[in-house]
Amino acid sequence: MELSTFAALLLATVAVVTLFRHLTRRKLNLPPGPKPWPIIGNLNLLAGPLPHRNMHALVQKYGPIMQLQFGSFPVVVGSSVQMAEAILKTNDVKLADRPRIAAGKYTTYNYSNITWSQYGPYWRQARKICLMEIFSPKRLDQFETVRVQELHALLRKLFLSAGKPINARDNFSDLSLSVISRLVLGKNYTVKSGSQKEFMSPKEFKEMIDELFLLNGVLDIGDSIPWLAFLDLQGLY
């Protein structure tokens, strides 16, 4: 009896709080969009193997700017040239912050790299360093030798595979990884070099990169419903 009474009081409290928030919420002129479900919002509309097609269908129905509810968070989607200009150019400073999701926390040392850090002095300094030390024309010219050497290595590999089926995607992916590895780490970790003992094998390096891309691209339930984040329902982190 005590348990049922407690449950009834809890449900009544939640209902009162929800009703109060609904009545006191300021009326906003929001973009059109589908009505969200409780707790999950509109995440059900993106479920399936091809979520981009689901998104396209929603755009066809609600127009070039619409609002979706991802769990606890409202999300505004712009899908036209005009909306892209308004978001990325006209209002770029207002919308420059990155969402604080699990990928940035666990793969970039608590949002400390240029990809996931919040817009501000730290981000501007990191961007300045990247532009001057990595992406400047002078640096790109200095790195040309590395790119040429890795390209020649790929061509030799393809020549030796003449008459055999090859996976073009894997070969081009290895080329990109080998160039990035040499530029950033000073060594090509995608191929085994000599008999010297290495702290990371090419297989381990590629698996680490694949896992990094996976974690930064997956839709984590805890990002949309924060009070479920500690459960790690998908076993990602």
Image: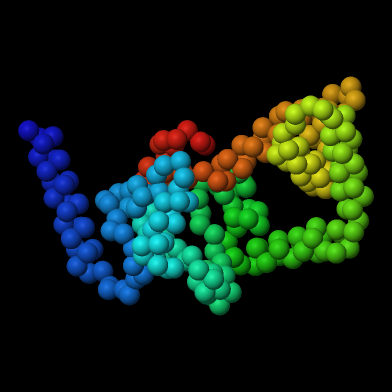
Horizontal and vertical percent position of residue 87: 52, 71
Quarter-wise, where is residue 194 in the image?
A: top right
Please, which residue is most extreme toward the front here? Answer: 163
Q: Is residue 43 visible?
A: yes
**Residue 27 falls left or right of residue 106:** left
**Quadrant into which the N terminus falls:** top left
Residue 152 point in image, percent of width and height = 90, 41
The outermost residue toward the left is 1
Task: Please name whichever residue, 67 or 209, is drawn nearer the observer in this view of the structure.
Answer: 67
For the image, the number of numbered tags is: 0
Q: Position of residue 49 (x, y in %)?
A: 46, 41
Q: Is residue 177 visible?
A: no
Residue plotted at (56% across, 67% down):
96
Q: Residue at x 80, y 35 (%)?
A: 189
The percent coordinates of residue 140 (x first, y second) are: 85, 58
Residue, x 26% and y 51% (percent of image)? 38
Q: Nearer the viewer, residue 217 or 99?
A: 217
* Residue sitting at x 72%, y 28%: 203
Residue 217 to residue 87: above or below = above
Instruction: Please state if 59 lies on the left or on the right of 29 as rendered.
Output: right
Q: Quadrant of residue 207?
A: top right
Q: Which residue is farthest bottom?
A: 90
Vertical placement of 133 versus 172: above or below? below
Residue sticking out furthest to the top: 195
Colouring chosen for the image of the structure: rainbow
